[in-house]
Image (tube, grey):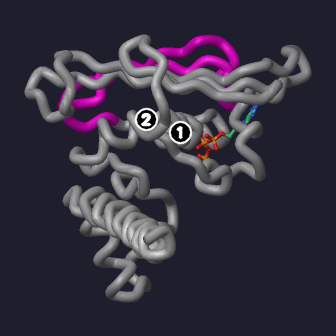
Amino acid sequence: MYLKSLTLRGFKSFASATTLAFEPGITAIVGPNGSGKSNVVDALAWVMGEQGAKSLRGGKMEDVIFAGTTGRAPLGRAEVSLTIDNSDGVLPIDYTEVTISRTLFRAGGSEYAINGHSCRLLDVQELLSDTGMGREMHVIVGQGQLDQILQATPEIRRGFVEEAAGVLKHRRRKEKALRKLDTTQANLARLTDLIAEIR
Ligand code: ATP
């Protein structure tokens, strides 16, 4: 599995559609200060479901939409598509190539799609969760983040490892199942009381 290409349209400084094609192995993005290198990394995190505007270096999510320049009007939507080569079947989906897309409208509302089919954020998260590219984005190490990891408490550090190893998904599912079990048990107790009253 490797990232094949990333297309940005209306995302931060990328007003026009721009596609970056990647090869297997290491890719380096070079350019002058302020040319948009970090915006490419932000786009990667965003299309994989990042929900925190601060993680994307903005104040609110709308800040990812091209805000306009002196020569160009602001745009009404940001779109990013990430194509992943899945010929080794690491992603649990029956396609050798998978394209994940995310769109945000300035007027409100957002959309996710997998291979052109509209889906929920949860579907994108589930698709990626066993790859280590999960919800917490530990595959993207930002400037200054290494220090944060080194200074984290052992519990928080364990969370990083669990996310990368794909364990966190099962922990979250277990917690959800336990909450459901609690509700069901409370319903059952109430039902038993009602039956006792009717008798
Ligand atoms: P450095 O090397 O200094 O870290 P960089 O190449 O990583 O720089 P970025 O931080 O990716 O640069 O890009 C910053 C540029 O993106 C700034 O010029 C900023 O104005 C522009 N930018 C950010 N958000 C938007 C937006 N919503 N609309 C238009 N331009 C934006």
What distance separates the C-alpha of mark 2 from that of mark 1?
A: 18 Å
Tag nearer the camera, 2 or 1: 1
Judge by depth and name the residue closer to the eye, 182 or 111.
182
Pointer 2 local density, CA inside 10 Å: few below 14, some 14–19, many at least 20: few
Give, as a three-letter code, the residue at label 2: Ile
Pointer 1 local density, CA inside 10 Å: few below 14, some 14–19, many at least 20: many
* Residue, disc 1: 46
Give above or below for 165 relative to 21.
below
Instruction: Report x, y in % for residue 53.
Output: 67, 50
Which residue is painted at 54% across and 41% down in the image?
A: 42
Q: Would residue 97 appear left or right of 105 to someone viewing this image?
A: left
For label 2, the SS is: loop
Q: Quadrant of the C terminus?
A: bottom left
Which residue is painted at 21% across and 25% down in the image?
A: 93
Residue 58 in view of the camera:
yes
For label 1, the SS is: helix
Q: Would residue 122 appear left or right of 22 to someone viewing this image?
A: right
Judge by depth and name the residue closer to the eye, 59 or 168.
168
The dot on residue 10 is: none
* Residue, disc 2: 29
Give above or below for 52 relative to 40.
below
The magenta stretch is: 1-27
Residue 71 lies in magenta, yes or no?
no
Given the current orientation, which residue lies at the most extreme left position?
88
Which residue is painted at 75% across and 26% down in the image?
A: 66
